[in-house]
Amino acid sequence: MILLTGGNGQLGTELRHLLDEQGLEYVSTDSTNLDITNAEQTMSFITDLKPELIYHCAAYTAVDKAEDEGKELDEKVNVDGTRNVVNAAKAVDAVLVYISTDYVFDGTKKEDTYKVDDQTNPQNEYGRTKLLGEQIVQESMEKYYIIRTSWVFGQYGHNFVFTMQKLAETRDQLTVVNDQFGRPTWTRTLAEFMVFVIKEKAPYGVYHLSNDNSCSWYDFAKEILKNTDVQVLPVDSSKFPQKAIRPKYSVMDLSKAKALGFEIPTWQVALEMMLK
Ligand SMILES: NC(=O)c1ccc[n+]([C@@H]2O[C@H](COP(=O)([O-])OP(=O)(O)OC[C@H]3O[C@@H](n4cnc5c(N)ncnc54)[C@H](OP(=O)(O)O)[C@@H]3O)[C@@H](O)[C@H]2O)c1
């Protein structure tokens, strides 16, 4: 049996669809039937179910709110919640797949990509708590996959693609930041990798997974709106002040995932497929 936390989130929903397609049995949870911040509930739910595999997709993901009014909840969900899931996973000897983020890096690299073993140095609260989650997994378990991803988009949640499309309905011109670089990730590609590592019995450890090729948010927006008349203009991120500091450059190295034989589409191809 497989257990999903965060099964109704953007990634969790994509993963459910993929598991359905593959005829794999799973139990999907969200905060209404399994609140991971509740240690007792998490332990009893998981020890009753006895999953062999846990896809831990639940997280506090409001990056800016995590800087102030959401700070406590961010810590509770991403750190305490992950610890509760890890303790329960250990109790039933389950494999754990923990999804992490490019925000564990500070983004000061200029050209070279971030390797899985590179020094972490989160610049915002969300990145700090996701990294603490990683450390709890690594210190307590052996049978784990930590998969860091970035700039996630897909059919099943709020994300940059839908935001751009929505804005384009009412505007002729959009300004988008051109000084933050990363790799967009289609939830489908990520979900496929999450299934792939289990099927292929990939070595446990830390992986980076996003779509191939990198871009700025401006490049991404231009591609999203390429079949419209909307003009996309590049702008410096100082024009869009946000509470949480984002890494300027968080292009992650994908060679470890590729070395497993997993084929990674470019973000342009992934975007085209998603929009179809
Ligand atoms: N989105 C991105 O760009 C991005 C980038 C890098 C990494 N990630 C990581 O990818 C993973 C999936 O992200 P996502 O985009 O799918 O996020 P999402 O859409 O915000 O989904 C997160 C899920 O976590 C659940 N959750 C929150 N608090 C919970 C609690 N106390 N107990 C149980 N469930 C709880 C939520 O369920 P409820 O709705 O029931 O509260 C929600 O379904 C996360 O680990 C995230 O950190 C995301």
Image: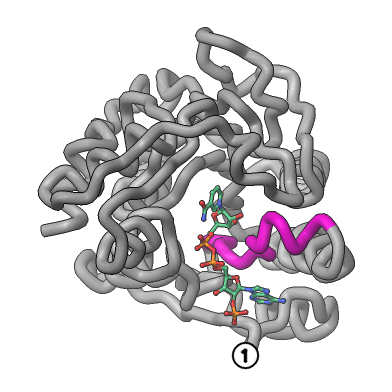
Stretch in magenta: 53-67
Residue 31 placement (x, y as % from top left) = 64, 83
With 27 as the anchor, is 84 left or right in this view?
Answer: right
Q: Nearer the viewer, residue 119 or 3?
A: 119
Residue 107 placement (x, y as % from top left) = 65, 24
Residue 199 in view, yes or no: no
Residue 126 placement (x, y as % from top left) = 74, 51
Q: Nearer the viewer, residue 189 or 275?
A: 275
- Residue found at x 69% / y 29%: 105
Q: Nearer the viewer, residue 61 or 35?
A: 61
In the image, residue 22 sits, relative to residue 115, either above or below, namely: below
> Does the magenta segment cover residue 58?
yes
- Residue found at x 29% / y 67%: 170
Q: Nearer the viewer, residue 68 or 251?
A: 68
With 108 as the anchor, is 29 left or right in this view?
Answer: left
- Residue found at x 75% / y 60%: 78
In the image, residue 103 sits, relative to residue 24, either above or below, namely: above
- Tell me the kind of residue under disc 1: Asn
Figure quadrant of residue 13 = bottom left
Q: Residue furthest front?
A: 172
Q: Quadrant of the C terminus?
A: bottom left
Figure quadrant of residue 158 = bottom left
Figure quadrant of residue 101 = top right
Residue 240 in view, yes or no: yes
Badge 1 element: loop
With 179 as the anchor, is 61 left or right in this view?
Answer: right
- Residue found at x 80% / y 44%: 128
Q: Residues within 10 Å of mark 1 (few under 14, many from 20)?
A: few
- Counting labels gives 1
> Does the magenta segment cover residue 38?
no
Which residue, given by chain and number where applicable, does mark 1 sit on?
Answer: 33
